[in-house]
Amino acid sequence: MRSHVTDVEALGALRPLEIATYLRASGWIERPAPFGEALAWHTADEDYEVLLPLSRRAPDFLLRVSDLLATLAAQEERSEPELLRDLSLSTADVVRVRVQPTQSDDGTISLDDGVALVENARALVLAAACSTVRPQALYPTRKPADAAEYIRRVRLGQTERGSFIVTVVSPVAPILDVPPPGQLFPDTREPFERRVTRTLMGALSAAHEAAQDVIGRGAGIAAFREVVGQGVSANLCDAIVGIAGDAGRPMSVRMAWSLARPMNVATVEPEVTFDPDALTVLNEASRLLKESAPLDGVTLVGSITRLDRSTDDGPGEVVLTAAIPEISGNAPRGIKIALNEGPYHEALVAHDRGYLVTVTGDLRKEGRQWWLEQPRDLSFQPSD
Amino acid sequence: MHVTQRQEQFSRAFVQAVASPAGFHCSTPPVDDDSIDLSLAARGGGGTVRAPRLEMQVKCTTTPHYVGSALHFPLPLKNYNDLRHTDVLVPRILVVVVTDPAPTRWIEIAPPDSTIRECGYWASLRGQPATSNAVSVTVALPLANEFTPMALANIMNDIANGVAP
């Protein structure tokens, strides 16, 4: 607890706005400082006092920030490194994804596991972003524009000790009390970024509850279909399972809301944990959601393996043997497509010549059979 | 310990000895700063620092050069430039401790009247002009500016009232 942060780069990277946000949210009171471009802050009981430079150009910026950190750490009874981290993240929602590594005690995990962890942490947040745009059971490779654009703004923070923790940083605009120019009232709508993090925690809680329903109360896997509206998707379930890894280690997700935009924590669970039993249920739930989910705008590549026409000309049905990556990886499936006369003839030719077929459409499942509806953008090429 | 290191330690101890009866806490900045050796302040909660605050560069000399009513001291250029800033958040001064060439004469224990040699002098370089010197600047510290508990208390009092030395 007494370790002083002497990392000049880390201290120098702090921005006055981040520190001020943190101080204000923690109940410190500001007043003008006697010297230089600065603010003096004190605790309500006036026992503690800090000087906050308003410009990084102040000659004693580093000295002052170092003092500030020491005083804050003493007042909060926390370590300086921890505080430094919180100060620099005070203007973002921070998602901490935590796994328990299997063998090592030295704070490391295998590189392969690490890569999977980061990739799935991204998938987790992206799934929540998709559900924020429009809740559905499964999202195709091509995600809604708002979600795809949001995920590009999300940052990866430094990993932290304590099992193994991956930090995902979602910057969020602070609440402003003043109306934007041209408006009468302050903007109180929740920005998209905050809706995503809120959806994430809500969906995780709902998935957790649904898993408990299945394990403890004998509910059917259909319990998961009922929480799609709360942001649970096959993509989310896959990400959670992916984070836990092959060994199915327990994992948890903890959210720290930006201090610049306080959250009513009574309405959203800030931390959700999944144990190995819940993970098994999630795996199954994901499979189920995929199997029954309609998937629009999917592009398939494969070969025509059957043709069916009751008359010599006119429309007919073909079977395209192709993989559906979103659902079953590389394993090919037979997908039926109803085609009009022209496209059917083209398919016939493609079949004869052994061409590869590319087609886009909306996937639906009827019983055990997959159908591609609204087929469009049909194209062929010789396979090599 | 090399003699210059001993001088350095002694001069800091001297400042601390003056600061203590005046009621101010002395500390070394946790972040390395070439020009600030000591930080003086009142004590806040949990051992933290609070206003009034003063930072200083502390030097030692055993061969003082007196000119008129001032002590002339060659201050390295970097220190000179760092001490003349006008936009620091905590005021800063230079203190030069004059002592005897022989370390055995720095402090003489003879109860009830022990002796510490010899005196510290302070000066503020705030707002001083830039210089074309390449190595050092000769600073004149008024001999009237003895660094005593009373003098320190006055400086801190002024600071508390928003007046920088």
Image (cartoon, coloured by chain):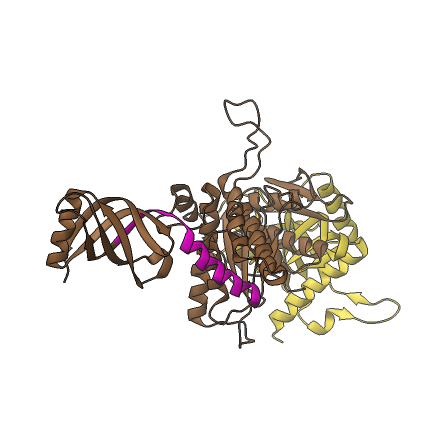
At 49% from the left and 45% from the top, the residue drawn is B130
Q: Residue B88, image x and y in percent?
A: 59, 45
Secondary structure mainly formed by the magenta segment: helix
| Magenta stretch contains residue A373 | no
| In front of the other: A202 or A335 | A335
| Magenta stretch contains residue A285 | yes
State left or right for residue B144 relative to residue A211.
right
Q: Residue B43, image x and y in percent?
A: 76, 53
Residue A318 visible somewhere in the drawing? yes
- Magenta residues, start to end: A277-300
| In front of the other: A227 or A98 | A227
At 16% from the left and 51% from the top, the residue drawn is A347
Which shade is chain A?
brown
Q: Is residue B78 above or below residue B154?
A: below
Task: Name the image quarter holding residue A215.
Answer: bottom right
Residue A84 visible somewhere in the drawing? no
Quarter the C terminus of chain B occupies: top right
| In front of the other: A196 or A257 | A196
Q: Residue A9, image x and y in percent?
A: 50, 57
Q: Residue A156, image x and y in percent?
A: 47, 56
Quarter the N terminus of chain B occupies: bottom right
State left or right for residue A358 relative to residue A280.
left
Task: Name the image quarter holding residue A289.
Answer: bottom left
| In front of the other: B27 or A149 | A149
State left or right for residue B6 relative to residue A231.
right
Task: Name the image quarter holding residue B117.
Answer: bottom right
Residue found at the far front of this picture = A310
> How many marks overall?
0
Q: Who's yellow, chain-wise?
A: B
